[in-house]
Image (cartoon, rainbow, N blue to C red):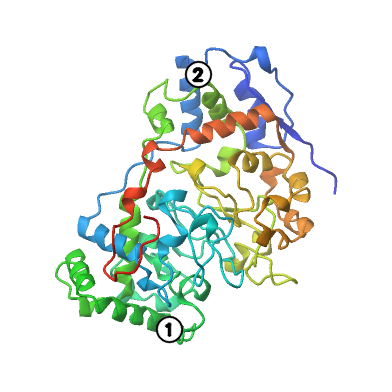
Amino acid sequence: MPTPARTRVLPLTLGIGIALLVGCANDDTPTAPVATGASRVSDMHSAAVAQEIRSLAAGRGIGPLERPAPVRPELVRLGQALAFDKILSGNLDISCMTCHLPAFGTGDGRSLSIGQGGTGIGPTRTHPTGAFIPRNAPPAFNLSALEPFFWDGRVVVDEQGHFLTPARQRVNPRITRAFEFGALSALPLFPVLSREEMRAESGNELAKVSDKQAQQVWHLLMERLGRFREYRRMFEAAYPGTRYAEMNFGHASNAISGFLVDRLAFNDSPWDRFLAGDDDALSEVQLRGARNFLTARCSICHNGPALTDNLFHNVAVAQLGPGKGDGASATDDFGRMRETGRPEDRYAFRTPPLRNVELTAPYGHDGAFSDLREFIAHYSESDLKLHAFDASALEPALQGTLLRNFDDILATRDPLLDGVVFDDVTIDEVTEFMKALTDPAARDLSAIAPAAVPSGLPVDGR
């Protein structure tokens, strides 16, 4: 197969920027190099440039991110307690938020999380057997703007309003009647079922339940919670008119989702202020980065208010870690194909949203990139970058897990990446634009962690 032509995506000048890069955004026509350095536009804050960038953004559906509707405080308080309480784990040693820490942009600062049985938090967390969760902990910002959920999209509501989840018919109307936030309300149902994440293999009553009996696990969790008067009171305050005895774990899952929706919605970044009409909200380099981003192929997938198409793409990220049991090595991860069965979906993962992306390293479905600029640079000649991937930057326990299945990954790489080349200046400028997507209020999330939880167990993230 002949090598596709390399499309040069270079710094732009005002008069010819759109014409030069429209080919990169919409087809594979190579573009000619453009002038750099002294020929760059000096007055990037002109009204004409600002309007041009806003028009480009509108063309990709990249508009303001609306805040979700207010969530009643009683539901938020219940969800906050449940999210941080280790009572939801089999051996009382991990909470939902242990892998979504406030101090690490609602991640854990790790390529791959360490689940139940581990000690410590964040990058210093360790496991006695060296066990890792197969995928990176995704950030929890602005979840009301996302769907489907998980890297492979295994939780979603279809066009008929049916909940499609790994638990299939076990997520029944009795459970979904409690849901107020669509597919997001179902998301917290699943980490508590995972033995490697929260439930454990042994040592507790949850672990004794068959993996096929999800409802029994959820029932036992409600029994646990019900032993605490404070939890019973909080549930009944969050769901007025419903007695605790009439509730199920759908009510707990919905509450956690309500907390995430309410407390982790951020839409006041410099980019938001720029979209609202403030021509001075972005620096000159950020404006150049915005235009590069919007006229290159980046914005084909990273579009909409949250800067994600909520679809799945193979962007040639190296596979590392324990994997999901796929391939000859059983340490591969076929991504979206695991859900669809379609060979063309192999190694495709959900497009991550970009709001607050500066705060959410490492990047990629398995956290292969610890640096934002490095990840942006990966999209330039990604085929060559994949073959040259250097595992020495990973933590020692993961360095030896790199799969050299590069040609297999490239066989289904998204054609949008064919021939794309960015120069170093463009990469720098796009990286600076990514920083303009950070809401200042998201930089310090310490207030979202409760001082204590009803179980009395220690709270990670304080």
Residue type for callout 1:
Asn
Label 1 residue SS: loop
Q: Is residue 183 above or below residue 429?
A: below
Q: Picture coordinates of residue 347 (x, y %)?
A: 66, 59
Q: Can residue 320 be seen?
A: no
Left or right? Give the position of 229 relative to 440: left
Instruction: Tell me the number on the disc at residue 442.
Output: none
Q: Find out whether the residues at labels 2 and 1 contact each other: C-beta distance under 8 Å.
A: no
Task: Determine the residue positioned at 33% across, 52% down.
Answer: 448
Q: Is residue 179 above or below residue 211?
A: above
Task: Determine the residue positioned at 58% across, 72% down.
Answer: 128
**For this rendering, which residue is in front, 11 or 269?**
269
Badge 1: few (under 14), some or many (20 or more) residues near its Cα, within 10 Å? some
Instruction: Tell me the number on the disc at residue 204.
Output: 1
Task: Determine the residue positioned at 68% across, 18% down.
Answer: 36
Q: Picture coordinates of residue 400 (x, y %)?
A: 73, 62
Cα separation, mark 2 vs mark 1, equals 62 Å
Badge 2: few (under 14), some or many (20 or more) residues near its Cα, within 10 Å? some
Query: Which of disc 1 and disc 2 is earlier in sequence?
Result: 2
Assign the C terminus to one quadrant of the image: bottom left
Label 2 residue SS: helix
Q: Is residue 261 above or below residue 246?
A: above
**For this rendering, which residue is in front, 401 or 5?**
401
Q: Picture coordinates of residue 19 (x, y %)?
A: 63, 23
Q: Picture coordinates of residue 177 (x, y %)?
A: 29, 70
Q: Can residue 75 be seen?
A: yes
Q: Nearer the viewer, mark 2 or mark 1?
A: 1
Left or right? Give the position of 363 relative to 379: left
Name the residue tied to disc 2.
Answer: 49
Farthest residue, direction right: 2
Farthest residue, direction left: 241
